[in-house]
Image (cartoon, coloured by chain):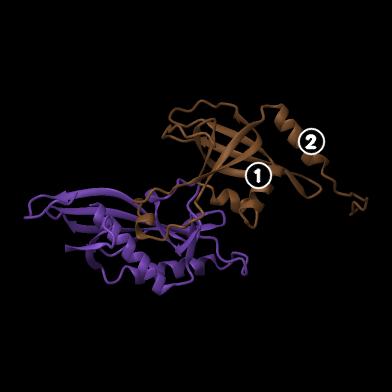
Chain colours: A brown, B purple
Amino acid sequence: MSWDTSTQNFDDHALRMANALLRGNGGTTASLLMPPATEDMTDAGQLGLNPPNFQSLPLSPAVFRRLRPTMREGQPARYELLISGVAVQGAVSQLQLSSADALFATAANVVVGGELFLIESTSVSESMGAVYMYRLLLREAASGWLMQPPS
Amino acid sequence: MQNARDTFYVTLRNRLATVSPDRTVVMRAVTRPGILVEDAEAVAAQLPLDVFVLRWTKLATDTQLPSILTQLTCEIHYATAGTQSNSGLDRGRCLEEMDDELLQILCPSSTPKMNYTHTPAAQMGTCVFWSQAIFDTATIGRERLGRVATVNVFAFQEQGEK
């Protein structure tokens, strides 16, 4: 067995390249719907009586595109959202979370272009151990609610 | 009917906090006992592990009585992948632990009906009561070991109750 012992110094070229490519290929903004800072500890909050008052957390640059369609009756359309690693790391720091996984696990939904989507799964692309892009697999929400754009 | 559903959930939640205080879940940034009502939370791709999830399914009524008796079927879904310290090899034990906790929180099988739309919650005139749990066969999905227990919850419709 051989080991790769070559010197690989990390620099942020992958992060910058991902940002440039995401901006150049659409460069949209996606917003995660996050729970509010003031926690609702009441019974009504757990019974669906109180509105959750989700806060919008905008992330950009991002690219949003429909996955290759496979026509199945009754199945909602699926999309993928590519988000810059810099934007996600900024959000993780801002909310003082432990990781990007925690960020996406805490998010209720995603809003892109005023439409609501549900997160099916997340994956990452990395270079030399540093994540430069996050890929979210999204499903169209059946409700069809039009959401407020981020202010 | 909604009052019966709310009462059943809050009763089980409060009992779980006593029976197994370490079984908690973080939902919308709030740490609370590890039980939730599926239709009162955001939609998730997969049910969370090590948490009891209440799913309300069937509804039946008996209108031959002085008050309408409603029968609501509640499926309680739970699954585990074991613990990290045992590399998941204890998932059978963890599922058995959840079985036991569920049996404990379902006893006694009645409680006064409450109205949680008021603050503080108001006690109503009748009780909510439920049947023994029927435990389904455990299901295995790769590292997940899960089970569904079904409970029939009964409540009388009171005057003016929706």
Whole-angstrom CA distance, mark 2 to mark 1, is: 18 Å
- The image shows residue B66 at horizontal and vertical percentages of 6, 55
Mark 2 crowdedness (10 Å alpha carbons): few <14, some 14-19, many ≥20: few
Is residue B45 rendered to the left or right of residue B1?
right
Which residue is disc 1 drawn over?
Answer: A123
Is residue B147 rendered to the left or right of residue A89?
left
Between discs 2 and 1, the one toward the N terminus: 2
Disc 2 is attached to a residue of which chain? A
Q: Is residue B121 visible?
A: yes
What kind of residue is marked 1? Answer: Ser
Q: Is residue B103 visible?
A: no
Looking at the image, which residue is at 48% across and 54% down? B28
Which residue is disc 2 drawn over?
Answer: A17
- The image shows residue B45 at horizontal and vertical percentages of 50, 45
- Classify residue A78 by image quadrant: top right
Which element is circle 1 on?
strand
